[in-house]
Amino acid sequence: MRIDQIHMADSGRLLSQLADRISYLIDIKGNSEYGNIGSLLGQIQRLRQSLFEIKESDLFEEIDRIEDRISFLEDRVAEKLSPAEIVNIVRSPQRFTLMDILENVYDSYTELGGEGECNIDPAIVVARATISRRVKNRLYSHQVMVIGHEKGQGEEYRNGGCARPWGNNKALKYMRVAETEGIPIHFYIFTPGSYPIEDYPGAAQQIARNLYVMAKLKVPMVSFISEGGSGGAEAIGASGLRLMGSRGYYSVISPEGAAAIEGKIREGEKLPRKLLEHCAAQLKITAEDNLRLGTIDRIIGEPPLGARRDDFPFFRRLRYEMLRATDELVLKTKNFRAFRAYALKRQAEEGKDVPEDFDLFIGWSLTDLERERLLEFRFKKYIELGKGYFIENKNILTQGIRKTKVFASKTYYDIRYGLLRPHHRNVQKVIEEVSGEGSVFLRKVTEPVRAAYDFVFPQPERPSKVIRSGEPERKSIFAEEWDPYVSPLANEDCTVTCPNAAKYGCLDLWVPDLYGEFCGVCPNCGHHFPLEYQWYLENLFDKNSVREFNAHIASCNPLGFQGYSARLQKDIKHTGRNSSIITFEAEVWGIRLVVAMLFSNFRGGTVGVAEGEKFVRACDVASTTRRPLLAYIHSTGGIRIHEGTLGVVQMPKCTFGVREYNDNGGLYIVVYDNNSYAGPVASFLGCSLYQFGIRSSRIGFAGPRVIRETTGQDVPTDYHSAKNALKRGHIQGIWDRREFKKNLYDALMTLGGPNLYYK
Amino acid sequence: MDINLNDLLRRYRSHPFEDYFVETPHTGVVFFKVKEGQTVKGPGGEWLHRPGTLLYVIERERNVKRMTALWSGQISGIRLDIEGQFVEAGEPLFSIRHQLDKEEIIDRILTQVLYIFSAPQRARYFLTPEISARMEKQFKQGVSVELGEDVLIMSLMKRDTMISYEGVPGSLYKVYFNSGDMVEQGSPLLGICSPDKLQYVQKVIHRIRTEWEK
């Protein structure tokens, strides 16, 4: 129908629709200068004001002309959408939100955990919903749990979809409800990032808990990403299948954040638009990029300029894709699935149009065995993420030797701990019980004889020696254990001032004393000055017990981020290492353990693909050898932004590795030192049941600047201190560096106990 | 309490400044980072966590210490003759002339005019319900407190103790704490004004608030 055929009464509605289209274009381009859009908006305003003064035919002619112009501009914009413009599409107030999805994709829903403003966290919406499909003119309904971020349609209290820690906790609660009820979960990710506050349960710690639980949640989970802002997205994103809107973005950091870091922009200064666009392009945040990198599984087509709130064909497609994805996850677990899987695949390939009917009905309930398979598939999927985006020695001979070594060690430890040890333990148990019974019996018989003997030949009483089994005798540090390693920092002839001097009146410290005898600790107030990671390698572990593995795995530049390769090479040359993580086997007073150490000298201890892979392999080694796993965090600045979402997916990947290790009976201990922030704390570190902090360390999700910029509030200087982390319950204790070895030993003995090596 | 308010006012009007003298904390070589007459800022932020303007650096044993301003104001009497020289501890360097604003002057006048009732120990303090009720009804006329009257509740370790007023009888002019705050020992809790001076003090403060420029 042509516009001029429409009745005059509709002209007002038409004009407001055109105004919406123009403001959407302005949102995308970020200004009203493109194609003189601003003047078009002015023309519409004038037409609105003089609606009844203009002749009807002239009015429609004018509307027709404006509409043609807008359509032309929309086509031009859609032809060349830059990543920064896609970000603008996602952030446009006209973009669909979770409430639109609940209204249009699902048949009915009941919101859980609050409604609207009366909510634990209005940024997270949870609902029990029904979704139906038609198969041969019969309607089948499925029950699902829908969990997602709600950006709101102008409501301030929604906080733009930034979930607070208790919002993520709410999501976790209902994930467990879904597991209890055995219904699939559909996640919808619409978040620019998590709200960076440390109040209990803590932004980072809660995301970590969510990931840890999602690793073994026994229901099919499908997630759809519209706006995937780093850690906030991961909190509800570690699903079996990850779908993404063709005009969505999924990124390690907001382009603004990346631009501020890359351009070293000071707080409060305006970001240059070109730098912003450059960073958005470098981060590879679009759906196509993410599909290519393997961080998502499928793209759901949207209109060229993105789907909006009234885009009903898109909602139809989304409904179809969510059903199909859930079917796919369920079918993978079935014994007999060949024909149904084929039918499902064929249906997807038949064309771009969404079919009216489904060819088949697939029930979504699973048996125990199928649930186990579901977890297995999910584990495999995440452990494989990022494979091929790090450098590994591909020499066939070297690889062959390595594989043989791994196989041999696996066989040896399987026999030792998997076969012999249980038998040994069972036999020991039987012997203990038999000897216990026997001793009672024998005592009855021998007691009168012994009493008579003791009466005739009395013995003086001796104090008994109580030694804990397996604990070596402690020796003085001034005798054999004296370690000659002295930090090179001690070689400077100068003094330094303790940061607490004004508060506690600490005197200036002579550097050779401070970094030598005092182990970098202020003798007055106990402030810990940072020390290099080598100090810990030399002082924390038994002499000559450190045996590094996987040192050959090296970081690379998977996104082709401009300037990153040169920086990597510089760090490799400077540190003599290939990544920011060192994984090794070591001993602490005779206790053998596997250690993963993130250190600050290499890209600030950030985690990329190589680091994630090395960590997962360390978990695997610890699991195979049945040894405790220690993650000592000398320092970490978060996920490495230069590796984009490949870095972000290391969060679930490593958490899955840890979960598998823990479930196999391992003991995983995390010790934070210096500064530990962001992604790693919000995943594979924060999920540990036993976390400790070295004194003067700082632990948190986001630094003070990010908190200031996001929340608009300043935080006290000790906001991230270990003491506050302890108060909030994020860590279980604060250790003094000088007693690190003793505390670690005690922790291993206490937490591991007799099952230290094999639970 | 025999203070001439007019004299006080005249003094602050003719010299509305407080001079803070900056001295070296220890021996060392001094390098100035400010100039004579330069305006400097004191620490900022909600927790005074943002350091003030860099004033000078002092180097001892190759330890370069950056000394920042603890008060806002103008630099005066800078001793450029010792620039780059080794100096002893306690060597005067310059002074920061801090211009007092209206509220600071009012506070200073009040601390001299009012009888300050201080916290006997570190605890949480509350006004007694009677005093609170009277304050709500007749704050403008002034709530009178008598010697021995229960005015405060001190809450410590979940135990509430009534605190009787000991001091000059008069009107409650200022409450220095928020109900339920943890107050350090010796910090001011209440400011009491003798009844004969009440109206006069109110008038002076009103004049400062309305007439003074800053």
Image (cartoon, coloured by chain):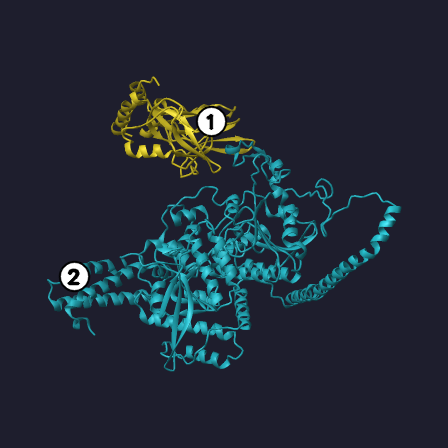
Please name the color used to draw chain B.
yellow
- Residue A603 in percent (x, y) is at 52, 52
Q: Quadrant of residue A2?
A: bottom left
Q: Nearer the viewer, residue A564 or A340?
A: A340
Up-down relation of residue A624 to residue A481 (above or below): below
- Residue A123 in percent (x, y) is at 38, 57
Within 10 Å of disc 1 (Cα), the crowding (few <14, some 14-19, many 20+) is some
- Chain painted in cyan in the figure: A
Tell me, for residue A47, which label it has, or none.
Answer: 2
Q: Residue at x 48, y 53 (%)?
A: A204
**Quarter placement of the C terminus of chain A:** bottom right
Query: Which three-letter amino acid code belongs to the residue tagged 1?
Result: Glu
Q: How far apart, in angstroms, are the residues tagged by discs 1 and 2?
A: 73 Å
Tell me, for residue B83, which label it has, or none.
Answer: 1
Q: Is residue A188 visible?
A: no
- Residue A278 in percent (x, y) is at 40, 57
Q: Quadrant of residue A625?
A: bottom right
Q: Residue at x 33, y 67 (%)?
A: A103
* Label 2: chain letter: A
Mark 1 or 2: the one toward you? 2
Up-down relation of residue A282 to residue A460 (above or below): below
Q: Quadrant of residue A621?
A: bottom right
Query: Which three-letter amino acid code belongs to the residue tagged 2?
Result: Leu
Helix, strand, or loop for circle 1? Answer: loop
Tell me, for residue A142, which label it has, or none.
Answer: none
Left/right of residue A49 with respect to residue A131 in the rendered view: left
- Residue A180 in percent (x, y) is at 49, 66
